[in-house]
Amino acid sequence: MKFSSFFHKPLTGLGFLFLLACNQETPRDPLSAFPIDEQLLSEVLTDTASLGKGEVTLHFSATLSVNEEKQADIFPPVSGQVQQVYVNNGDYVRKGQVLGTMRSPEVAIAEKEAEGAKAELRTAERQWQSTQALFASGLASAKEVEEAENEKILRQSVYQKNHELLKIYGSGKEGRFVFTSPINGFITGKNMYPQMQIRPDHETSLLSIADLSDVWAIINIYESDIANIRVGDEASIQLMAYPDQRFQGKISHIYHLLDPDNKVINARVVISNHGFRIKPGMLATVEINTRSDHRFPSIPADCLIFDRNQYHVLVIQSDRKKVEIRQVKVDRKTDGRAYIAEGLKGGELVVSSKQVFIYESLKP
């Protein structure tokens, strides 16, 4: 339809409203109301601002990570040269499984000292037994028996110390240090290779192992949402790898440190990982249903009109004879709805179709 033919029709509905706006000669208050006829009302869709029960659905981006409480990092307690490495990233290992070996001069010295301590203990035990026999036959004094017993106890202590040190080293003899897994889990980090020289000041872990029976989703919470998130809130997690499946979890911890650059804090959601389908590093979307301290009226987000850096809605007055341009303050948008913090009350009727055209016709 040509623009000129628009005015050859009866001035009802949107045509009436458009002509009314064109004939206005003086600037209008944007909060003033304009007449609306039944024909116009029948041509547009409307929606009622609903007042919720204080329940809010929030969406966040998240990154999946290992459960740090079920992770083990292996550091070398001695220096030496790596001989063998039996695992690779992603391998599943069991507690006590040998992961690799390293030749270490410190272990060789400890083994030699342990052998010496063992020999000295045997000598001290024989001496104590001999002194006891001499004491029984009257050829040794009680003091000599006491001295022999003290020597035996000292040699037992030295031997036990060396024995415990070798247990820590996991020595397999010939100066070998044996790396074993302290937990069941997957190799998630590897910085250990044959012939690699380990210095005494080595500060990074050689191997990292994680139990992935459950994982963490680390979510970013913007400052405006902090007040609505609580420990224990139920969370629904969707992964790009499994678009048709949702995983469930709960917020277990909120990190009360605000990132000064991004204005976010982190929270973690614990997710059960049956079958180890979830991999650390995956990206996720987390949906959290929580209760809000504010009960804001909500309308379809499409009802909003953004102009001059402000949001507006068209409100139909209770007598259904006038329409009003209303400036509103939006608290949040989620699931296609806008929650209005200021400017709208629950139960008010708003225009939900052709609202931009009407707004442009009426605005000053």
Image (cartoon, helix red, strand yellow):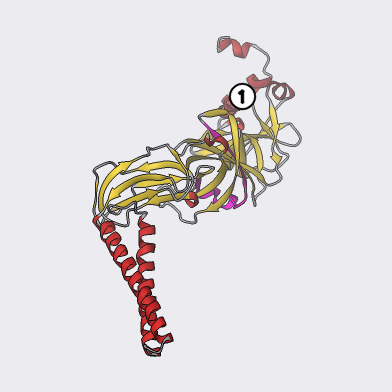
Which one is nearer the viewer's eye here, 157 or 242?
A: 157
Inspect the magenta stretch and tell me whether residue 225 lies in it.
Answer: yes
Residue at 39%, 67% (x, y): give it: 160
In the image, residue 264 sits, relative to residue 248, either above or below, namely below
Residue at 37%, 43% (x, y): give it: 189
Residues rendered magenta in the picture? 219-239
In the image, residue 23 sits, relative to residue 324, either above or below, namely above
**Residue 289, can we see it?**
yes
**Residue 326, can we see it?**
no
Q: Which residue is mark 1?
A: 354
Spot occupied by residue 123 in the image (x, y as percentages of width and height): 33, 72
143 left or right, relative to 199: right
Spot occupied by residue 361 in the image (x, y as percentages of width and height): 57, 27
Which one is nearer the viewer's eye here, 355 or 292?
A: 292
Q: Quadrant of residue 138?
A: bottom left
In the rendered image, the quadrant that contains the C terminus is top right
Mark 1 lies on a secondary structure that is loop
Which one is nearer the viewer's eye here, 45 or 56?
A: 56
Q: Amino acid at mark 1?
A: Lys
